[in-house]
Image (cartoon, rainbow, N blue to C red):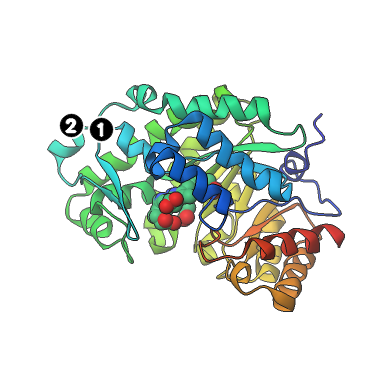
Amino acid sequence: MTDKTILRALRGEALPTPPVWMMRQAGRYLPEYRATRAQAGDFLSLCYNPDLAAEVTLQPIRRYGFDAAILFADILLLPQALGMDLWFETGEGPRLSTVTTPAGLAALKAAGDVHDRLAPIYETVRILSRELPRETTLIGFAGAPWTVATYMIAGRGTRDQGPAHALKSTDRATFAGIIDLLTEATIEYLSAQVDAGAEVIKLFDSWAGSLKGQDFEDFAVAPAARIIAALRARHPGLPIIAFPREAGEGYIGFARKTGADCVAIDNSVSADWAARHVQVDGCVQGNLDPRHMVTGGEALVKATRDVVRAFSGGPHIFNLGHGITPDADPENVALMVETIRRG
Ligand code: CP3
């Protein structure tokens, strides 16, 4: 049995001090990240350079001693591996070629053919599993099919995921085909990350909140359940964290319905509510408002303690409700970690 704190929490243990890591912990708020990204040239070159991607993954571990490291990569590398174009516009975010027609879907690669392009990512995982401190858990990840599909259909990030919702109603077969292909490709991608040394898998469904009613069941719950079942069949006992962001009431029962060991909670719901309604089914992760990493001070200390206290009756991994932002102050992250660990 391992003594890694994250794995213990994922097995359902309530620990006296919750383990902690942060979404986007390797990122632009850190000067050492910005320096390594400059050395790589740009963000995508950094993702595909195993030595430098491993380096930026390790930077926040060295600085803060987080209990987990998350592989440095991006959820949009998978559509690129399926044959789509991907680039990042400075200051604006991701851009992709689009897929909205049966012919466009047919032109994509098969799920099993993504590995050549993704080989550098698996190499990053192998380097990390050698170099991480023995107490640090290595988390691999992918985007959930719905969230990745929203970018593939619109060719960019969208406020309300309008283009994906539109395709879902005008050409349901093509939409469902995209979700199916992504589900299969995600199983292949995550399984290869586990083979390379990832100890935990996290599935990011950042736009799950815009799926309502039966759509939430069909396109957030069902694909996650399929991915989790397939991964468990190949890797018995693999711990999995699901993040159906802004699911609201949809968080209730999400772990039971999908088989996830842990549900990550965003900060649009209160920790007390999530303890009552979600932690009853097992481990939860979250959910400090990332704004506190910008504003700091006593409010940060109080909010951190409130999250720890709310979840102290059950298994909990401390995290932010969403990714840390580039304007965050690294000192505030240190204050958060210190507040959690000194109790
Ligand atoms: O958490 C980590 O530190 C691991 C690495 C990671 C990144 N992206 C690196 C990244 C992870 C887990 C992601 C997930 C991701 N990527 C999601 C889901 C989680 C979420 O935030 O909701 C999404 C939707 C994406 C797609 C994406 N990548 C967008 C919309 C952007 C642009 C917005 C932004 O923050 O710049 C990215 C770029 C990106 N991915 C950066 C990083 C560190 C910033 C790139 C840079 O250095 O300029």
Seen from the viewer's position, the closer of residues 54 and 1 is 54
Q: Earlier in the sequence, mark 1 or mark 2?
A: 1
Residue in the image at 32% along x and 47% along y: 149
Q: Point out the frontmost of discs 1 and 2.
A: 1
**Rendering coords of residue 334 (x, y %):** 72, 60
Q: Quadrant of residue 186?
A: top left
Residue in the image at 78% along x and 42% along y: 5
**For the residues bearing labels 1 and 2, Cβ distance under 8 angstroms:** yes
Amino acid at pointer 2:
Ala
Amino acid at pointer 1:
Gly
Look at the numbered disc 1 and say if its residue's Cβ is closer than 8 Å to ligand 1: no
Label 1's element?
A: loop
Tell me the distance, in whole angstroms, between the alpha carbons under discs 1 and 2: 8 Å
**Residue 143 in sight in this render:** no
**Residue 307 in sight in this render:** yes
Q: Is residue 75 above or below residue 94?
A: above
Q: Quadrant of residue 197?
A: top right
Dot 1, crowdedness within 10 Å: few (<14), some or many (≥20)?
some
Residue in the image at 51% along x and 43% along y: 36
Seen from the viewer's position, the closer of residues 91 and 155 is 91
Q: Label 1, on which residue?
A: 83
**Rendering coords of residue 54 (x, y %):** 56, 34
Q: Is residue 330 above or below residue 129?
A: below
Q: Label 2, on which residue?
A: 107
**Rendering coords of residue 193 (x, y %):** 52, 28
